[in-house]
Amino acid sequence: DTAVSQTPKYLVTQMGNDKSIKCEQNLGHDTMYWYKQDSKKFLKIMFSYNNKELIINETVPNRFSPKSPDKAHLNLHINSLELGDSAVYFCASSPPGQGLGLEQYFGPGTRLTVT
Amino acid sequence: AQTVTQSQPEMSVQEAETVTLSCTYDTSESNYYLFWYKQPPSRQMILVIRQEAYKQQNATENRFSVNFQKAAKSFSLKISDSQLGDTAMYFCAFQEGPGNQFYFGTGTSLTVIP
């Protein structure tokens, strides 16, 4: 019944490690997003994919690499984790359509803690 | 670059009272959308209300309404008859093309006091 799901919900890891966060949506949406919410609650777009194609890539270190195997999935892989990567990462999706005003549906977030 | 400013980091309101959260934005676009999202302690982001820039009529959703002043680039959220469940972070968001991405404000933490 879950619309946008993320795994894991919590991730604790050490500096230098590589980790992945998975996102899946069962809404039939075409566009998926990754956002980062820092410790001050500021939410910032990182990436956007439409039909498996990258359409937004904000200023994000190359250590972050999104991968979309199909329309329903958008995974985020992070290499060489740093302390500053600690944050909550949200996946979101929006319905098909070219116009603005399309609501984004958010996943529950993944709290990443790098020690 | 688009910017969204929420000048009230924290607010509180008595249960059943009315509260207004402010939001201003900066853009050179003529067509865009504005949203308010709510993030309760559960962390889940929930859409509260949306407004199209071309519509002069202010959007309303039950106890939630907006005051959209396009010339002033202002988009405030009014919550009437506040309830304990309204306690949350509220984010104002600006949406524009081509990727329809959101630009979020820094959020306002609202506490409803019983």
Image: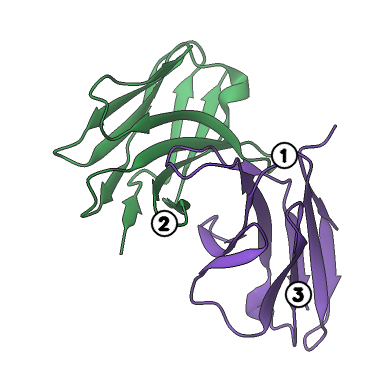
Circles 3 and 2: CB atoms closer than 8 Å: no
Amino acid identity at mark 3: His
- Is B58 left, or right, of A25 in this rendering? left
**In the picture, which quadrant includes the C terminus of chain B?**
top right
Q: Secondary structure at mark 3?
A: strand
The green one among the chains is B
Residue pictured at 28% horizontal, 48% vertical: B25
What residue is shown with label 2?
A: B98
Alpha carbon of mark 2 to alpha carbon of mark 1: how far?
A: 31 Å
Secondary structure found at label 2 = loop
Q: CA distance from mark 3 to mark 2?
A: 25 Å
Where in the figure is residue A74, as x and y percent of width and height? 73, 60
Q: Is residue A96 left or right of residue A86?
A: left
* Colouring style: by chain
Given contact means CB atoms under 8 Å apart, are the residues at marks 1 and 3 in contact? no
For the residues tagged 3 and 2, is the chain the same? no
- Amino acid marked by disc 1: Ser
Q: CA distance from mark 1 to mark 3?
A: 25 Å
Which residue has dot 3 on it?
A77
Q: Which residue is disc 1 drawn over?
A: B42
The chain coloured purple in the image: A
* Callout count: 3
Q: Nearer the viewer, mark 1 or mark 3?
A: 3
The chain holding disc 1 is B
Q: Nearer the viewer, mark 2 or mark 1?
A: 2
Disc 2 marks a residue whose amino acid type is Pro
Q: Residues within 10 Å of mark 3 (few under 14, many from 20)?
A: some
x then y, percent, for residue B112: 53, 24
| Residue A67: % across, % down | 73, 70
Q: Residue at x 41, y 50 (%)?
A: B105
